[in-house]
Amino acid sequence: MSASSLVAEAVWKAIESAGSVTDDQLSILHFLFGKNLERATRIVDQRGVKMIVGEPSGRSIFQVVGESRRKEEYFCFAEHYCACYSFFYDIVNRGEQLCCKHQLAARLAASLGACIEDKVSDEQLALVLSKL
């Protein structure tokens, strides 16, 4: 894991434990994620992050609304994967970013308790996951 990833993880854990973001934490996140953080905060402000939770397992995945006019929705695991083009191009292929704006939005919304939560059966969640 890179130093940037370790710093980001420490900041996320501090935000999660406090339930809010300090100016210093915001500065660090902005340094690490740049314009993607600004885009992610817009998504969160527009209530564009839904956490789909399987019952009774508690397993979950995020569904994040894109910013284009089409308002595409991308499924993602905040720390590991997003179905968007940018994830594959900028993160996987080029290694230029730590994560995409959808992953950031999911992580930020989850840390601040700003997700819309949608509870479904584990079978329904499995169907969603099978389409990835």
Image: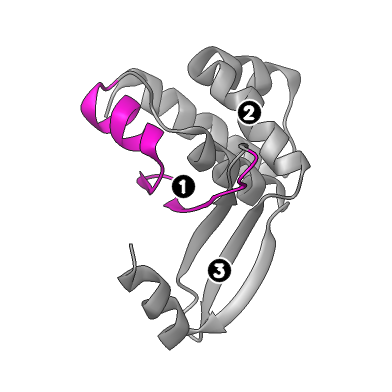
Q: Residues within 10 Å of mark 2 (few under 14, many from 20)?
A: some
Query: Which residue is at 68% across, 49% downward?
Result: 48
Q: Nearer the viewer, residue 52 or 74?
A: 74
Q: What residue would you read off at disc 3? A: 52
- Is 32 located above or below residue 83 in the figure? above
Residue 1: image location, x then y, percent: 26, 29
What is the CA distance from the residue labelled 2 to the residue labelled 1? 15 Å
The quadrant of the rendering that contains the C terminus is bottom left
Query: Which residue is at 64% across, 38% downward?
Result: 15
Give the amino acid at mark 2.
Arg
Give the amino acid at mark 3.
Ile
Residue 127: image location, x then y, percent: 38, 79
Q: What residue would you read off at disc 1? A: 78
Question: Which residues fall within the magenta stretch?
Answer: 69-95
Q: Is residue 12 left or right of residue 117?
A: left
* Magenta highlight on residue 88: yes
Query: Which residue is at 58% across, 42% downward?
Result: 66
Circle 1: element type: loop
Residue 53: image location, x then y, percent: 54, 72
